[in-house]
Structures are given as structure tokens and as C-alpha cells.
Image (tube, grey):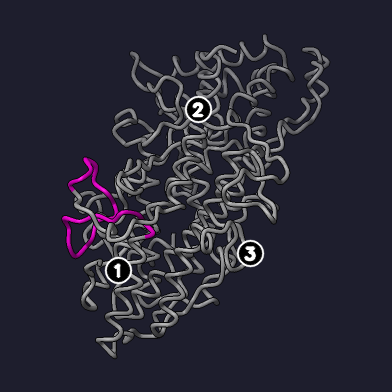
Amino acid sequence: MIETTINDRDDLIKYLHKAMVLEHATIPPYLTAYYSIHPTTNSDAAHIIRVVAVEEMLHLTLVANVLNAIGGTPDLTRPDFVPSYPTYLPDGERDFVVDLRPFSPEAVETFCKIERPALAPDGARLMPASSTATPSLVTSPTREEMRFYSIGEFYAEIIEGLQVVAAQEPDLFCGDPARQVRPEYFYSGGGQVIVVSDLNSALRALEFIAEQGEGLDGGIYDKEEELAHYYRFRQLHFGRYYQKGDSPHDAPSGPRLDIDWDAVYPVKVNAKLADYPVDSELAQVARDFNAEYFAFLGLLDTAFNGKPSLLLDAIWYMFRLRDGINRIIRNPLPGSGGLHAAPTFEMPTAVDSAPGASRGTDEAARAVAR
Amino acid sequence: MTPDALEDFLSLSVDLTAFERTDLLGTGLARQYLAKVRDACGEDVVTALLEAHRAARTEAAEDGARPDPQRLDRALRHRIFSEERLGPVARNVIKLWYAGTWYGLPPEWTDSYGAQPAAETSTVTAASYQEGLLWRAIAANPPGAKAPGYGAWARPPAIEDRYLKGRSHDRTG
């Protein structure tokens, strides 16, 4: 018997904040691998990574909708929102490392682990956090000493908690409907956004997140007959596409998928600003990118806090971030023995950003006006 | 291609284009561009151009300090742009970075200094059009590539301060 760690609305809010951290945390690793691929090469692999990265953005938005629906306030600019890489995610008894690394077989293995959470044996959903040496990103926000067996179990806890609390608190879904991100502000982004107004829609949103990763009931396709993320990445492992009729237990039997592991910029794994030559132009560019990314999170934060129409601006903002990542990655990193630079995703601390820059409409509005 | 030649070519290109070194490397095309100039003009011309640029920087720098912008401007004009053999090549290098196209040198030039097999107007790679610096300079996307996102055209171009009128680029870096 599992003892619940979610007893009221506040607990749920804490969990959903953590879910937003988790959904976002997968995006920098996908982007780093994606943009490390030489332009016009590896188009099959690039496409697979891109589709999954975009779907993670949908997941982030869906969690924000659930959080808003129960009266929470999304916060994407607090100091621990972006993890320091390498970060650690749970995979059963052990954690696995999530790096920012170039497209490579190692990156594909990590992506497979991210997307197929292990199913815990009965009663083993939560385990003492001290059982691993590494700081898992998926600890319980209400019982800090406990960590989850897997990402899947983390979502299972939220889904069950939501049902328990909804039964106790009839006004759980008290959020302002105007704060919901609706399809007019989120489109072409990995599926249709689900507007959350009650228990039913909240459960649909969370189950969608869990299923898109690992497939429905262990099959390789999900409800929409789309290949689940885990199996998309398995194709890169095997160098072959799945086709209808393939079993999850066997290798894919579809057409060959050509991968050129060498047509990749060898970016430094988990690059930090400290790896850049002090006071160099390149270090400044990397710092500027981090500031831009932080301002972008500020824009999303404002969008998720009552101004969903700002997500339309987020689209071209993301394209500008794309150009910035490409420029950095094509620069050799001096003193690294032939490696290339990469965005570090180290967010400016309160000390080095301007007063009030941590969040709020003004900051986002300024960022948008640039 | 020696690493030194690439470094020299980047240093020259920073002074010619007013873009930073990281921007030039950020196109991913610096090596291909140097190779293109060599193929189009010959090794001797490239070597002379890089030497003239080094000399201009030395002339503009007093006592080993950073080059003075005004003096560098004058030295580049004297040693490169007004020089009959190097001037047209340097102007072509600017166009190469900005447009991603190598433009054939004027017939007067080839009559005097000889035509190379790759001297004709040509694009360098499929990526060079997209990576042309002109798009960054005017803060627009190359039409048909680097999609800026729906509605981006409704906003004024976000041109970097240093390229706005009235600001002079400090090319002493």
C-alpha cells in the first residue's frame, strides 16, 4: 500500500511546480543535441529530436494549465527552475545522468531513458532519496527525503493525488479560466493543447503527458497512432524505422534510417561559462545567450500568468534563440582540444540581473520590444 | 590550410565586415570562404592580402598597443582598398561574407593578374545564402529560410545598436 504524499491543494501545487521544472529540464538536452547536427545532414535524426522537443514544450504548457486551473501561479524564473547540468533523473533503483551533449549514441541512450520511465514494483513508488549519491530531480516536494522510482511514478502520484484532493475540496478547480492557454495561442506544437477546467480535463492533460512518452499500455503507438517518444529514439539506436505490426520487444523492421554520427559539431559536454576564456568575446556571447534565454522564460512566465496571447511572441523569440544557439555551437571553444562551444543554460542569478528582472510583465515586455 | 591562415583571414574579415569574430565563425563557413578566395584569386593574392592587412594593423598600432580606429581606417584604405591588385579582392571578400556569393572579379583585374579556374560568380555552399551577414545587418531573415515565426514581420527590425546610423564600429578589437 502506497502512502500518499499529496493531501491538499498546496501539496498539489508544489508537485505541479516540480512537474514544470521536470518538463522544461528535458528541453536543453534535446536542443543541444539537435543543433549540434551539421546543417543539411542527418535530417531523419534531426526531425525525430525536433518533434520530441516540441512535444515537451506542449507538456510544459499542459502542466501550466493544470496548475492554473487549481489556482496556482506558474513560476519559470525562480532560481532553481533550470537545473544545473548534468542533472539526474530516476530510473528505478538508480538515477541516470542527463547531460547537455552533442548528438551521439550516448545522447540517444539518455533520451530513451528519459522517455521510458520504469514501472515500480508494488509499494516501491517512493524510496529514500539518500539511497543514491546523486541529487535526483524527481524528489517529493512534500517529503523532501523521498525520491520517486521513475518519472512515470511521479506522474502517477500526481494523478492519484488530484483525484483524492478533488473529492475533498469541491472548489479545487477555482482557477481563472482566462489564465488557460487555449488552442488559438498554442498550435503546430506537438498536439492540441487541453484546456483544464475540471478533474476530467486535468486527468486527460496529465495522462496525455505520460502516454506521449512511453506509448499506450506498453505498445509502440499512442492513442493518436503516433509512435511514442521512446520508440522514436529507439529507431536512432537501431538505424531503422518502425512500421505498423512491429512489436515493442523486437527491433524495428521498417526502412533504413541513415545516421552520420560524424556530421556533428563536437560540442563540449555540459559546457559552463567557466570553460570559456575569461573576458573573451565568445564568453560574452554565451552570457548574452543565457540572459536571452532567461528573458524568454520571463516571457513564458508572464504568458502563463494571465497573458496567454504572449505565446504568439514566444514563437519568433524561439526562432531568435535558435539562431543564437547555432552561432555559439559553430564556434570552436579555445583551449578545449578541438571541442566546440555550446550554450550553458546557466541562468543569471539575482545578483547579476537588474532589480526586478527576475519576473514580471515589464521585463517580458521589454524583452519582446527588443 | 594552416590554422594561422584561417586566423589571419578571420582578423581581416572582422575589419572588413564590422562583424565580430564569433559572428563570422557562427556562420560555420569561414573555412569554405577562405578556400573559395584562394580558388578564385590564387594563393599569392591571398597571401599578399593577409600580409597587407597585418601591416595595416601594425601601422595603426603605436608601441604595440591596440590599433587606433582612425589610423587603421586610413591604413586599410592605403594598403588594401586603393591597391590595384588587392582592392577588388578585398571588396569581393566583403560581398562574400554579406551575400554568401563569390562575385567574379572585374575583367580589368583578370586581364592584369590572371584568371583562376574558380574565378566566376558562384555560390559557395547551399548554406551560404542563408548565412549571409546582410540578413543580420538589416535584422531580417533570408527570404525562404530561417523562418522568423508567424507575425514577426509586424515588428520593427531589431537592429543591433552598433549598426545603427551615427555609431561607428570600433574595429580595434
Bounds of the magenta span? A130-152
Apparent side of residue A97 relative to residue A191 in the rendered image (left or right): left
Query: What's the CA distance linking mark 2 and mark 3?
Result: 64 Å
Q: Is residue A34 left or right of residue A125?
A: right
Circle 1 residue: A360
Residue on which disc 3 sits = A225
Q: In this rendering, does residue B18 appear at all?
A: no
**Location of residue A244 with respect to B87 vertically, above or below:** below
Q: Residue A178 lies in what quarter of the image?
A: bottom left
Counting other residues with Cα less than 10 Å from the Cα at mark 2, is it few (<14), some (14-19), or many (20 or more)?
Answer: some
Residue A121, image x, y percentages: 33, 56
Marks 1 and 2 sit apart, C-alpha to C-alpha, by: 45 Å
Mark 3 falls on what kind of element? loop
Labels 2, 3: one chain: no
Q: Residues within 10 Å of mark 1 (few under 14, many from 20)?
A: some
Chain of the residue on which disc 1 is drawn: A
Q: Within the magenta stretch, is there residue B122?
A: no
